[in-house]
């Protein structure tokens, strides 16, 4: 017997959810359903995303409403159209063995006339986003005077998105006798305030500790230099061959740029952000749910309400402004009792944010190391081996081809066959990660910002341990910092980990190397040419090559036999993704997204 029967759910609903794979109630369902079935309490339920909250309120609603009456009896408000559609489809699936259950999804980005027609035909449950719901109310196209239950799902998200006034306006059209059920992953002050305003002595249920993350999620962070961020991100993805993840960015531009770069580099990826039409969003989400996309690159707002099963990783390409947003991001994985990994790729300055998130979640993060090129190749090789070993063979279909296959391979030994078969994919990674540099930021660089963001010296000798070098190549040569790093390492045979700050100008650049490597670098560039022009390396400040701080000398206008524009108006913008750096390592040429324009940083309630 299905345990949902014991919670008070009737047979036709239990039969429907059994077909959907509901075998045992989740903790939030087990604790909340008996309380909500009484229909006599306001209710506050605190639980992480992915714990089964939709069934926790959806099943009791199906028990408590009178479906012989064809007017709105329940209103469910949620923050995003994706979540609105998900809740609507779930309730329809729960009620498929019942009769006359009418559920309407009301959300922006779709035809309002279609939604109005559905409402006019008769509806008992309305699932809506606040903005579109308020629009329909203002048209006097719906009557909530007989609503018995209002559900505020993902209440903290709705408030974060600025829906407070809309919610107030919507709830003012509902009767005082209604019962309000509020579900939220976190309980910030604003959610507590709305509970006090609209509820009368609510029953409060908290699964776990307030504002903490899902216990089934492992939290990791990687410290990299800003210029290596995209390369490190790709290497993490390559190290997890079966990854099915969501990658979070801060801005729409960053989201689009990374998705386009991944596509150029051969990954199955696409972006989800606020500039997409509803049709485009639906197309992207269908591909992701069908798993034809391996990586979904999204902003916080666009990803709210995404409920996709078996997401293995959440990757924070950029950390969010607020701890609560991190909780919601990481909650996209490890849903319905499964496990998952939340990864943050940070620079040393962001260690303080990681510590604050740790305190907010009450969970320690693991500092992980970016895998080496060898590690990635090994992981990919054995992924291929496991797939070959576990593949299901269609004996009937392949039998007709076996004689020809055997003929093709008759001159190969078993060992030769295995090596060649495994090498089909393995060689691609082997070539790509040849001479791949170490992308982990040096440990001392990580410690530099551990305390109050204060920059520490490189060592006891401070900055004198590094020498600043001038090179007569810059952005007009189509170099950015990632490209230049790869070129320097390839030419001088030093590790990218040892190279310090790189400053790319228009017709020249500066870079720092340890004092011990200066001779090796200058020797490596002895006689070097770039596109037929001699490459010149000098210690910064020698001769007339460097402009003195505050004015003074100038850079040579004519280098290598032709005139080039001075840095300034003609200087190319740093950045751009290029799939791989010049020494074949993992993706030189990466845009530095650490600097944000003011308009890209909306004011938040609370910052790190």
Image: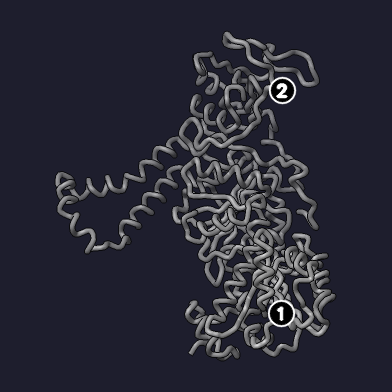
**Along the line of sight, the residue nearer the viewer: 301 or 12:** 12
Q: Does residue 48 sit above or below 101 in this rendering? A: above
Residue 510: image quadrant is top right
Q: CA distance from mark 1 to mark 2?
A: 62 Å
Q: Disc 1 vs disc 2: which is toward the camera?
A: 1
Tell me the residue that label 1 is attached to: 72
User: Is the residue 517 above or below the residue 110 in the image?
Assistant: above
Give the x, y percent position of residue 308. 55, 64
- The tag earlier along the polypeptide, 1 or 2, is 1
Q: Residue furthest top?
A: 561
Residue 372 appears left or right of 562: left
Image coloring type: one colour
Q: Is residue 593 left or right of residue 294?
A: right
Q: Residue at x 73, y 81 (%)?
A: 149
Quadrant for residue 571, please give it.
top right
Kindly identify which numbered label has been placed on residue 607.
none
Quadrant of the snapshot with the C terminus: bottom right
Which one is in front, 67 or 281?
A: 67
Q: Which residue is mark 2?
A: 569
């Amino acid at each position: 017997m299905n345990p949902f029967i014991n919670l008070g759910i009737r047979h036709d609903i239990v039969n429907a959810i059994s077909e959907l794979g509901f075998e045992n109630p989740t903790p939030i369902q087990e604790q909340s359903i008996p309380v909500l079935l009484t229909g006599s309490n306001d209710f506050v339920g605190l639980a992480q995303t992915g714990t089964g909250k939709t069934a926790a309120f959806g099943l009791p609603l199906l028990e408590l409403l009178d479906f012989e009456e064809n007017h709105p009896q329940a209103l469910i408000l949620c923050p995003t159209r994706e979540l609105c559609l998900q809740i609507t489809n779930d309730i329809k699936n729960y009620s498929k063995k019942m009769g006359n259950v009418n559920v309407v999804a009301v959300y922006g980005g779709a035809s309002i006339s279609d939604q109005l027609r559905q409402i006019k035909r008769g509806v008992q449950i309305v699932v809506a986003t606040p903005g579109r719901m308020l629009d329909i109310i203002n048209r006097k196209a719906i009557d909530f005077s007989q609503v018995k239950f209002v559900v505020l799902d993902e209440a903290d998200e709705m408030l974060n998105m600025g829906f407070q006034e809309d919610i107030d306006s919507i709830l003012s059209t509902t009767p005082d006798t209604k019962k309000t059920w509020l579900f939220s992953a976190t309980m910030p002050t604003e959610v507590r305030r709305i509970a006090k305003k609209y509820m009368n002595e609510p029953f409060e249920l908290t699964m776990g500790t307030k504002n903490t993350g899902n216990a089934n999620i492992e939290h990791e962070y990687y410290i990299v230099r800003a210029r290596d961020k995209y390369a490190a991100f790709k290497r993490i993805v390559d190290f997890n061959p079966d990854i099915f993840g969501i990658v979070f960015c801060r801005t729409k531009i960053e989201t689009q740029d990374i998705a386009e770069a991944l596509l150029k580099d051969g990954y199955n990826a696409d972006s989800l952000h606020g500039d997409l039409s509803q049709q485009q969003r639906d197309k992207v989400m269908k591909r992701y749910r069908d798993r034809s996309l391996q990586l979904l690159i999204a902003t916080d707002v666009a990803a709210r309400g995404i409920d996709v099963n078996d997401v293995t990783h959440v990757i924070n390409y950029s950390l969010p402004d607020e701890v609560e947003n991190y909780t919601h991001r990481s909650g996209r994985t490890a849903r319905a009792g499964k496990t998952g990994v939340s990864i943050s790729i940070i620079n040393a300055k962001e260690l303080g944010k990681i510590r604050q998130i740790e305190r907010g979640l009450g969970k320690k993060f693991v500092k992980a190391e970016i895998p080496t090129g060898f590690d990635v190749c090994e992981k990919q090789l054995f992924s291929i081996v496991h797939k070959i070993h576990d593949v299901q063979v269609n004996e009937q279909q392949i039998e007709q081809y076996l004689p020809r296959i055997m003929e093709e391979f008759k001159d190969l030994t078993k060992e030769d066959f295995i090596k060649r078969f495994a090498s089909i994919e393995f060689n691609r990674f082997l070539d790509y990660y040849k001479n791949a540099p170490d992308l982990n930021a040096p440990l001392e660089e990580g410690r530099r910002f551990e305390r109050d963001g204060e920059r520490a010296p490189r060592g006891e000798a401070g900055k004198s341990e590094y020498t600043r070098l001038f090179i007569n190549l810059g952005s007009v040569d189509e170099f950015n910092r990632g490209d230049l790093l790869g070129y320097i390492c390839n030419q001088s045979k030093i590790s990218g980990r040892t190279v310090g700050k790189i400053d790319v100008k228009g017709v020249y650049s500066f870079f720092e190397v340890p004092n011990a490597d200066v001779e090796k670098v200058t020797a490596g560039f002895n006689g070097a040419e770039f596109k037929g022009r001699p490459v010149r390396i000098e210690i910064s400040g020698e001769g007339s090559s460097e402009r003195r701080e505050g004015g003074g000398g100038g850079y040579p206008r004519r280098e290598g036999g032709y005139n080039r524009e001075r840095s300034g108006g003609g200087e190319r913008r740093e950045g751009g993704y290029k799939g791989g750096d010049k020494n074949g390592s993992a993706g030189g040429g990466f845009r530095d997204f650490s600097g944000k324009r003011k308009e890209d940083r909306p004011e938040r309630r609370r910052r790190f």
